Image (tube, rainbow, N blue to C red):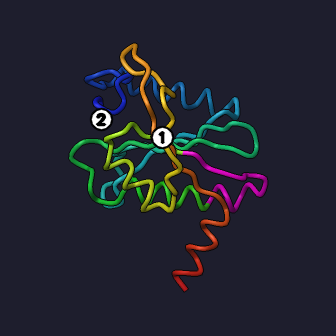
Amino acid sequence: MHRWMPEEADPFGEGEARAFIEEAASHLAAGTSVALAIADESTDVAVGSTTFHVWGSRHWNVGYWVAQGQRRRGLATEAVTRLSRWAFSDYPRLARLSLYTLPGNEPSQAVALRAGFRQEGLLRRWGEANGEQVDWVMFSLIREDLAAEGSRDA
């Protein structure tokens, strides 16, 4: 995870986890983001997280991670898919969900695509990592994408 999220502590210990939870609670109270645990259904143990960062009522950003050893089980895809459907269902003004990955982060990009997001393009020098400007790959999901997905499933 540190390879793709270099701003996160490595190792991510109990202190960092507590700070993450406190920050998530603060953002939830302020209405600026919603962070939820991804739990293993059989053990109810948290193995990751998914977050919606709120940019007003119409545009949200989606983030997620899954702990090493718990990946490749579809947990992130299921969490992002379920929460995306919830967001569009419960927030009628929501127009779009955006999702960003670093180039080369193919597992995360695969999650986005499996969850119904569409790749829009490369945002050159969009972010920063380790003090350097880096490119990001942008994905989006709009309400109509879910409607089209539903018609294919029928």
Q: Residue at coordinates 52% horizontally, 41% vertically from top-left?
A: 51
**On residue 122, which mark appears?**
1
Q: CA distance from mark 2 to mark 1?
A: 21 Å
The spot of residue 141 in percent (x, y) is 59, 56
Query: In the image, which is nearer the foreground, mark 2 or mark 1?
Result: 1
Q: Is residue 106 left or right of residue 124?
A: left
The spot of residue 132 in percent (x, y) is 40, 16
Q: Is residue 141 left or right of residue 91?
A: left
- Pick out the residue farthest to the left: 69
In front: 122, or 8? Answer: 122
Q: Secondary structure at mark 1?
A: strand
The spot of residue 119 in percent (x, y) is 49, 52
Q: Is residue 17 above or below residue 56?
A: above
The spot of residue 13 in percent (x, y) is 30, 24
Q: Which residues are magenta?
A: 86-98
Q: Is residue 78 above or below residue 129?
A: below
Near mark 2 (Cα within 10 A), the count class, few <14, some 14-19 or many ≥20, is few
- Pick out the residue farthest to the top: 131
In front: 13, or 140? Answer: 140
User: What amino acid is labelled 1 in the image?
Assistant: Leu
Magenta span contains residue 148: no
Q: Which quadrant of the figure contains the C terminus?
A: bottom right
Say which residue label 2 marks.
1
Magenta span contains residue 94: yes
Q: Residue at coordinates 26% horizontally, 56% vertically from top-left?
A: 72
**On residue 22, which mark appears?**
none
User: What amino acid is labelled 2 in the image?
Assistant: Met
Near mark 1 (Cα within 10 A), the count class, few <14, some 14-19 or many ≥20, is some
Q: Is residue 53 left or right of residue 13?
A: right
Q: Secondary structure at mark 2?
A: loop
Q: Quadrant of residue 67?
A: top left
Q: Is residue 12 above or below residue 57?
A: above
